[in-house]
C-alpha cells in the first residue's frame, strides 16, 4: 500500500517519519522498543494504532481502524505497509540492521506473504496485552 496525499497527515510535521504499530501486540511492542534502542538518530516517531493519533492517521490513509494486520510506516505523506514498511524502516537504522534492505530484491508478493504469516499469527505466537502499553516517561518524546 502506498497512498500519497498532498497535505501533511494529522499530528505529523512535514519531515516526520512515523511508525504505527499494534499497541497490544507483544511482538509489535518489542519492535517499538527495538526502534527506540537502535534509532540513535531519532529519525522515527512511534504511535500505537489504538491511540487517538494512530486512529487519525489510519483514517487519513483509509486504513481499517478496528483490526490491524500490518504495521504502517509514514514518510513524506506516503504510507507504506507490510514488508515495504519494514524495509523502509531498516534502511534508516545503523549497520548491521540496515543490511536487511537487501531483502528488497525479493519480489513484493513473496515478501508480503511471509510478512502476513507472522502478522496474522502474532498474538498466538508472541502473545497479547490486555490493553495498549503506555510509553515510559523517558521515551515519551519518541511518540506522537
Image (tube, rainbow, N blue to C red):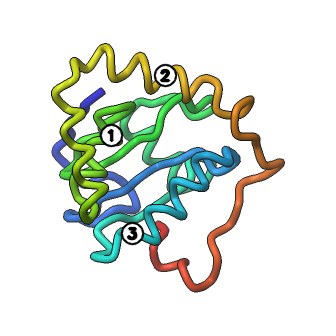
Residue at image position (68%, 48%) is 26
- Are the residues at dot 3 and dot 1 in contact (C-beta closer than 8 Å)? no
Dot 1 or dot 2, earlier in sequence: 1
Query: Which residue is outermost to the right?
Result: 130
**Disc 1 from disc 2: Cα separation:** 13 Å
Residue 95 is situated, as x and y percent measured from the top left of the image, at 24, 62
**Disc 3 from disc 1: Cα separation:** 17 Å
Dot 3 or dot 1, earlier in sequence: 3
- Are the residues at dot 1 and dot 2 in contact (C-beta closer than 8 Å)? no
Residue at image position (57%, 32%) is 68
Q: Secondary structure at mark 1?
A: helix
Q: Which residue is mark 2?
A: 116
Q: Which residue is mark 1?
A: 85
Query: How many neighbours does mark 2 have within 10 angstroms: few (below 14), some (14-19), or many (20 or more)?
Result: some
Residue at image position (71%, 34%) is 123
In the image, taking residue 24 as reference, residue 18 lies left or right, namely: left
**Disc 3 from disc 2: Cα separation:** 25 Å
- Are the residues at dot 3 and dot 2 in contact (C-beta closer than 8 Å)? no
In this figure, what is the number of numbered marks?
Answer: 3
Quadrant in which the N terminus is drawn? top left
Q: Nearer the viewer, residue 16 or 108?
A: 108
Q: Nearer the viewer, mark 3 or mark 2?
A: 3
Residue 27 is situated, as x and y percent measured from the top left of the image, at 61, 46
Query: How many neighbours does mark 3 have within 10 angstroms: few (below 14), some (14-19), or many (20 or more)?
Result: few
In the image, taking residue 115 as reference, residue 12 lies left or right, namely: left
Q: Nearer the viewer, residue 59 or 130?
A: 130
Query: How many neighbours does mark 1 have within 10 angstroms: few (below 14), some (14-19), or many (20 or more)?
Result: many
- Quadrant position of residue 69: top right
- Quadrant position of residue 5: top left
Residue at image position (55%, 28%) is 118
Q: Which residue is mark 3?
A: 38
Residue 81 is situated, as x and y percent measured from the top left of the image, at 36, 33
Amino acid at each position: 500500500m502506498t497512498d500519497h496525499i498532498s497535505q501533511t497527515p494529522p499530528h505529523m510535521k512535514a519531515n516526520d517519519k512515523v511508525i504505527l504499530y499494534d499497541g497490544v501486540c507483544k511482538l509489535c511492542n518489542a519492535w517499538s522498543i527495538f526502534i527506540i534502542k537502535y534509532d540513535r538518530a531519532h529519525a522515527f516517531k512511534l504511535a500505537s494504532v489504538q491511540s487517538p493519533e494512530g486512529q487519525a492517521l489510519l483514517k487519513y490513509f483509509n486504513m481499517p481502524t478496528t483490526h490491524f494486520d500490518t504495521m504502517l510506516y509514514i514518510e513524506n505523506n506516503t504510507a507504506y505497509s507490510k514488508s515495504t514498511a519494514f524495509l523502509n524502516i531498516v534502511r534508516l537504522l545503523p549497520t548491521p540492521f540496515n543490511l536487511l534492505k537487501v531483502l528488497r530484491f525479493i519480489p513484493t508478493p513473496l515478501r508480503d506473504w511471509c510478512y502476513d504469516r507472522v502478522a496474522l499469527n502474532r498474538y498466538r505466537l508472541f502473545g497479547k496485552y490486555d490493553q495498549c502499553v503506555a510509553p515510559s516517561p523517558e521515551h515519551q518524546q519518541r511518540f506522537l
